[in-house]
Image (cartoon, helix red, strand yellow):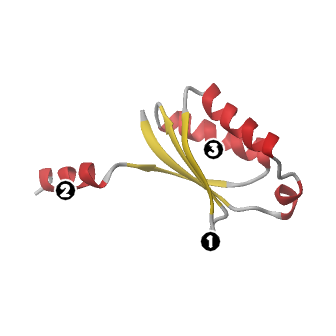
Amino acid sequence: MTTFFMMGKYNQDALKEMSIKRTQAAVKAIQSLGGDVTGMYALLGEYDLLFCVRLPDIETAMKASLSLTRLTGIPFNTCPAVSVETFDRLAVEQV
């Protein structure tokens, strides 16, 4: 499983539909793709939402991003992530 950060920005239509039920549906959508939501945060700044998810692969992450956009009307920017420890190990291996 790979960690992905999914960052979303509300638009006017998406704001009108905010609800606990929609949030629960978003979690279920990730789970239906074999994923796991490890954290969800509301943000101030460029993005309004941050979902931390674990998904099997990049193709599944693309499906998840599209699925959440269709479900919520919120466009998501989805990025794969590795721990800093893994990044440090990878950086050393490249030298």
- Identify the image quadrant of the N terminus: top left
Q: How many residues crowd mark 2 within 10 Å: few (<14), some (14–19), many (20+)?
A: few
Nearer the viewer's eye, disc 3 or disc 1?
Answer: 1
Q: Is residue 60 above or below residue 53?
A: above
Q: Residue at x 64, y 71 (%)?
A: 44
SS category of the residue bearing label 2? helix
Q: CA distance from mark 2 to mark 1?
A: 29 Å
Residue at 83 percent across and 52 percent down: it is 18
Q: Quadrant of residue 67?
A: top right
Say whether residue 29 is left or right of residue 80: right
Name the residue that disc number 3 marks: 65
Q: Nearer the viewer, residue 90 or 31?
A: 31
Q: Secondary structure at mark 3?
A: helix
**Residue 13 image position (x, y, % from top left):** 87, 58
Q: Quadrant of residue 70?
A: top right
Report the disc number at residue 91.
2
Res 23 quadrant in image: top right
Q: State the SS at label 1.
A: loop
Q: Is residue 84 left or right of residue 51?
A: left
Mark 1 crowd level (few <14, some 14–19, many ≥20, 10 Å Cα): few
Check disc 2 and give the amino acid type: Ala
The residue under label 1 is 46
